[in-house]
Amino acid sequence: MFKKLGLVMLMVAAFCLMQIAPAMASDPAKPAAQPEAKKETTAKPMAHQHTYANEVAVCGCGKLFVPDANTKYIEYKGKEYACCTEGCHKMASGNPEAAAKASEEQLAKLMAPATTAEKK
């Protein structure tokens, strides 16, 4: 009987010690660390030196494709847009504003939630 009671008391003491040990470990003379203020970050354009796993792109022509190491890009207003073929790259390079707008519109169409009419 005393062995069981002793074991239970030891377990309760260990549990209590685990609960109060972190509070005892902090130094009361030292002020608590203040959380750092969130830093403003800006979006960086997509880098060409990354892996292409599970990535898709929308070309200015509206084609959805998987970019690879040979994919050519255009840049417009600090943002990069992938081109699906050499012909699309030449077309987009001639008028990057129109290609960027077309790409954004196609992306918006693809990302828009399906309406109930489309589900039927």
Image: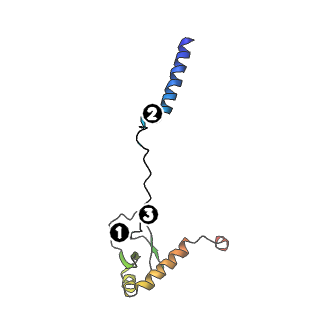
Earlier in the chain: of badge 3 and badge 2, it is 2
Earlier in the chain: of badge 1 and badge 3, it is 1
* Rendered-image quadrant of the N terminus: top right
Whole-percent x, y for residue 21 in the image: 46, 32
Whole-percent x, y for residue 96 in the image: 40, 84
Residue drawn at the location 36% of the way across and 63% of the way down = 51
Where disc 3 sits, the SS reads loop
Q: Could you give the CA–CA distance between mark 1 and mark 3, rounded to whole angstroms?
A: 15 Å
Q: Is residue 61 visible?
A: no
Residue drawn at the location 37% of the way across and 79% of the way down = 74
Residue drawn at the location 43% of the way across and 84% of the way down = 97
Amino acid at dot 3: Asn
Amino acid at dot 2: Met
Disc 1: CA contacts within 10 A as few (<14), some (14-19) or many (>=20): few
Q: Residue furthest front?
A: 29
Where disc 2 sits, the SS reads helix
Residue drawn at the location 38% of the way across and 65% of the way down = 52
> Residue tagged by mark 1?
47
Task: Name the disc covering residue 24, or none.
Answer: 2
* Rendered-image quadrant of the C terminus: bottom right
Query: Which label lies toward us, 2 or 1?
Result: 2
Residue situated in front as seen by the camera: 42 or 27: 27
